[in-house]
Image: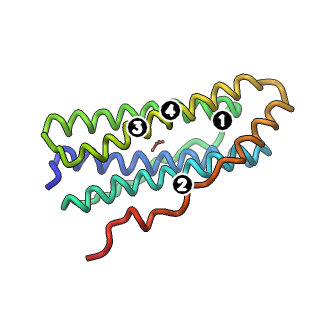
């Protein structure tokens, strides 16, 4: 049985992960409008990963006999000052997500909900990669600030990101 305090936090995390997807989809649309299709592609791939993250938490609630409560997803921004500002927003958001996962971890330890630990361990590791990727995007974009050709090359590089396979069906619990 999922501890009620943990259940509430995990439900909130489902919403935060779906907001991550929304935010990255919004940034992708901003890049499309700015003729940066590679960066848009990178963000689209990231948005899909975020939906998978949301479903991992969602499935955990169901598998542990909890109740999924879906709340409204906040509206993300439409515009950013520059590609750098958009990547900085994504890094800031990833740090917020890491902190949120640490808070769930604290609650799991406090309530001795050991069955939730493996899922959170996965997310703690995942956030190392998420922050690393977001930091790399910021740093690379800083390097090409004011250099149109450099920006186009970076755009091409980011367009090569492989989109994750559609594995949602493997994550969702089978109907009983
Ligand atoms: Fe779900 O890792 Fe990014 O937000």
The span from disc 4 to disc 3 (Cα, nearest Å) is 10 Å
Q: How many marks?
A: 4
Determine the residue located farthest toward the right in the rendered image.
149
Mark 1 element type: loop
**Residue 154 left/right relative to 162:** right
The span from disc 4 to disc 2 (Cα, nearest Å) is 17 Å
Whether residue 97 is visible: yes
Whichever of labels 1 and 2 marks the residue nearer the N terminus, that label is 2
Mark 3 element type: helix
Per the image, the residue denoted by label 3 is 125
The answer to whether the residues at label 3 and label 1 have Cβ atoms under 8 Å apart is no
- Viewer-proximal residue among 78 and 172: 172
- Viewer-proximal residue among 149 and 79: 149
Residue 131 bears which disc, if any?
A: 4
- Viewer-proximal residue among 105 and 84: 105
The span from disc 2 to disc 3 (Cα, nearest Å) is 18 Å
Question: Any atom of ligand 1 within 8 Å of the CB at mark 4?
Answer: no
- Picture coordinates of residue 130 (x, y %)? 50, 37
Q: Residue at x 45, y 55 (%)?
A: 52
Whichever of labels 4 and 3 marks the residue nearer the N terminus, that label is 3
Q: Count neighbours of disc 1 (C-alpha within 10 A) and say few if under 14, some if 14 to 19, many if 20 or more.
A: some
Q: Count neighbours of disc 4 (C-alpha within 10 A) and say few if under 14, some if 14 to 19, many if 20 or more.
A: some
Whichever of labels 3 and 1 marks the residue nearer the N terminus, that label is 1
Examine the rendered structure and indicate whether residue 72 appears above or below residue 82.
below
Per the image, the residue denoted by label 1 is 80
User: Which quarter of the figure is the N terminus placed in?
Assistant: bottom left
Whichever of labels 2 and 3 marks the residue nearer the N terminus, that label is 2
């Amino acid at each position: 049985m999922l501890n009620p305090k943990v259940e509430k936090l995990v439900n909130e995390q489902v919403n935060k992960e779906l907001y991550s997807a929304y935010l990255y989809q919004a940034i992708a649309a901003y890049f499309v409008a700015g003729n940066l299709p590679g960066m848009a592609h990178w963000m689209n791939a990231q948005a899909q990963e975020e939906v998978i993250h949301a479903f991992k938490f969602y499935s955990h609630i169901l598998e542990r006999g909890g109740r999924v409560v879906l709340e409204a997803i906040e509206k993300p921004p439409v515009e950013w000052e520059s590609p750098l500002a958009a990547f900085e927003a994504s890094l800031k958001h990833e740090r917020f997500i890491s902190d949120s996962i640490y808070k769930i971890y604290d609650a799991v330890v406090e309530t001795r909900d050991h069955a939730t630990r493996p899922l959170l361990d996965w997310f703690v590791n995942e956030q190392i990669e998420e922050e690393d990727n977001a930091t790399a995007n910021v740093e690379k974009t800083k390097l090409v600030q004011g250099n149109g050709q450099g920006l186009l090359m970076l755009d091409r590089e980011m367009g090569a990101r492989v989109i994750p396979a559609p594995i949602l069906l493997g994550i969702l619990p089978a109907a009983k």
